[in-house]
Image (cartoon, helix red, strand yellow):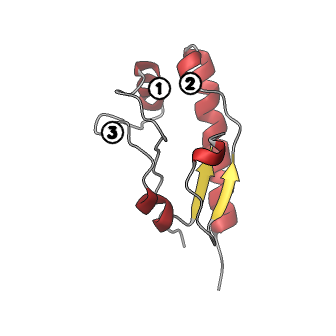
Amino acid sequence: MRGVLTLISARITPSEHLDENVVTVMDEIGISLDEQFPKPLADDVVQAADVVITMSCGDTCPIYPGKRYEDWTISDPAALDLEGIRSVRDALRTRVMELADGLVTLP
């Protein structure tokens, strides 16, 4: 039996728009970002999460007791070419799949 995994991406200080190259590489694997926009990391999102993945935000990330936090070191796609962004996408996909596998509990 498979569950549902909802992923939300946000930043402490979001950009004004999505990076065109990020949109391109996600589209390559069938993920459309057409309806997406940069979002601020809100307290209510963190409070509702089962797992919070941070990427080097340090003390600026909201921390709530009882939440599972993981800090992933990933290159910022804004500083990369298309191939570099593909590598980031693929690394994140692998990490998310590993995380999802670890969240599964059987009766």
Q: Tell me the tag on residue 10.
A: none
User: Residue 55's spot in the image, x, y percent?
Assistant: 63, 41
Give 14 or 90, whichever is nearer the viewer. Answer: 14
Residue 73 position in % (x across, y down): 71, 37
Callout 2–callout 3 Cβ contact below 8 Å? no
Q: Which residue is mark 1?
A: 22
Residue nearest the viewer, comparing 45 with 107: 45
Mark 2 to mark 3 CA distance (whole Å): 17 Å
Location of mark 3 (residue)? 36
Q: Earlier in the sequence, mark 2 or mark 3?
A: 3
Three-letter amino acid code at the position of disc 1 = Val
Query: In the image shown, does 40 or 8 lie closer to the viewer?
Result: 40
Tell me which numbered mark, 3 or 1, is placed earlier along the sequence.
1
* Residue 41 visible to an observer of this rendering: yes
- Quadrant of the snapshot with the C terminus: bottom right
Relative to 22, 95 lies left or right = right
Q: Residue at x 62, y 19 (%)?
A: 84
Q: Position of residue 34 (x, y in %)?
A: 30, 34
Task: Say which residue appears at 54% left-offset and 73% top-offset.
Answer: 1
Dot placed on the residue nearer the N-terminal end, 2 or 1: 1
| Amino acid type, callout 2 | Pro
For badge 3, the amino acid type reads Gln
Residue, far front: 59
CB under 8 Å between discs 2 and 1 = yes
Residue that label 2 marks: 77
Against 28, is 6 above or below?
Answer: below
How would you rate the neighbour count of disc 3 (Cα within 10 Å): few for under 14, some for 14-19, many for 20 or more?
few
Q: Viewer-nearest of labels 2 and 1?
A: 2
Q: Could you tell me which residue is drawn at 62 percent across and 41 percent down? A: 57
Tell me the element at label 1: helix
Label 1 crowd (10 A; few <14 / some 14-19 / many >=20): many
